[in-house]
Amino acid sequence: MDRLPTGVTRVEGLPGQGLGLAALVAGPEDGPLALCLHGFPDTAWTWRHLLPALGAAGYRAVAPWQRGYAPSDLPEGGRAQVGAAVLDALALHEALGAGPDAVLLGHDWGALACYGALALEPERWRAGVGLAVPPGPRLQEGFLAYDQLRRSWYMFFFQHPLAEWAVAASDLAFLERLWRDWSPAYDPSEDLGWVRQALGTPERLRAALSWYRAQLDPAEQDPALAEAQAATGRLSSRPLLYLHGRADGCIGAELADGAVEGWPAGSRVVVLEEAGHFLHLEQPERVEEEILGFLGAP
């Protein structure tokens, strides 16, 4: 790695959440918050290229390990869902003393958490950036198409208890295959080392799989999170930049084509040719250019 964030911090006892999250940080402490949320199977290190760029631009860039992912805390009962991540984002905004000039970025599950936090409390945020998973309305339109269902087979497999054994086998080799299927031209060896640290115990892996179980099975959802969970399927009033890789093996690029219709003023969709699901790692300079061009200077 030629560039790294400047350090790791922990935010303890998040307001309303009661758990602590570890996070990578970069940039000036008095800069507006740029909160970066990772997805599955990934870690905060996925933002290692973008965090220094955001920090150099003047943002206080913060990338937490999502709840359940070591070294962040394991949620009570070992269960997690994207609605909880929405509230974590709002709680981090409060705990870090951020203002309405904050921006929110997310990839994969982190993108859905980003959309939910933007929709639930838009007054906290100036703009949002989503990568690889489009906003709820667009995702809902395309998810039940045959081609997308075929790509999403793993989500249905994760509903079965057998998944915990199969995914854990051979040092999480299952997750390596997902990475290589989703971004065929990218070598994820470095990233997988961090993933194994984050999800290398049965409790951690179970918590990560529970995001999928809650998404497809309402019985797995916490009723107290119903409002936050529902917000992930709505559009916010804040402008949004959406980035997608044309070669994404997880979410088809057809879900991004023409997606900006009906979005808030100032929103944009950019499809990167020859990039896959982990486009911010495959083409970090291009993604950095698009994001900083959209967000502008603080």
Image: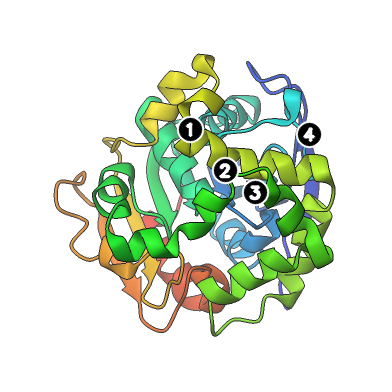
Question: Mark 3–mark 4 contact, CB under 8 Å?
Answer: no
Which residue in the protein does label 4 denote? Answer: 73
Which residue in the protein does label 3 denote? Answer: 63
Which quarter of the rendered picture does the N terminus lie within?
bottom right
- Residue sitting farthest toward the left: 261
CA distance separating discs 2 and 1: 8 Å
Mark 1 element type:
loop
The answer to whether 289 is drawn above or below residue 75 in the figure is below
Which residue in the protein does label 1 denote? Answer: 217
The colour scheme used to paint the residues is: rainbow
Mark 4 element type:
loop
Regarding residue 191, the answer to whether it shows in the image is yes
CA distance separating discs 4 and 2: 23 Å
Question: Mark 2–mark 1 contact, CB under 8 Å?
Answer: yes
Mark 1 or mark 3: which comes first in sequence? 3
Mark 2 element type:
loop
Question: Mark 1–mark 3 contact, CB under 8 Å?
Answer: no
The amino acid marked with disc number 1 is: Asp
Mark 1 or mark 4: which comes first in sequence? 4
Q: Residues within 10 Å of mark 2 (few under 14, many from 20)?
A: some
Q: Residue at x 56, y 44 (%)?
A: 35
Which residue in the protein does label 2 denote? Answer: 159
Q: Residue at x 75, y 21 (%)?
A: 13
Where residue 109 sits: x, y (%)?
52, 48
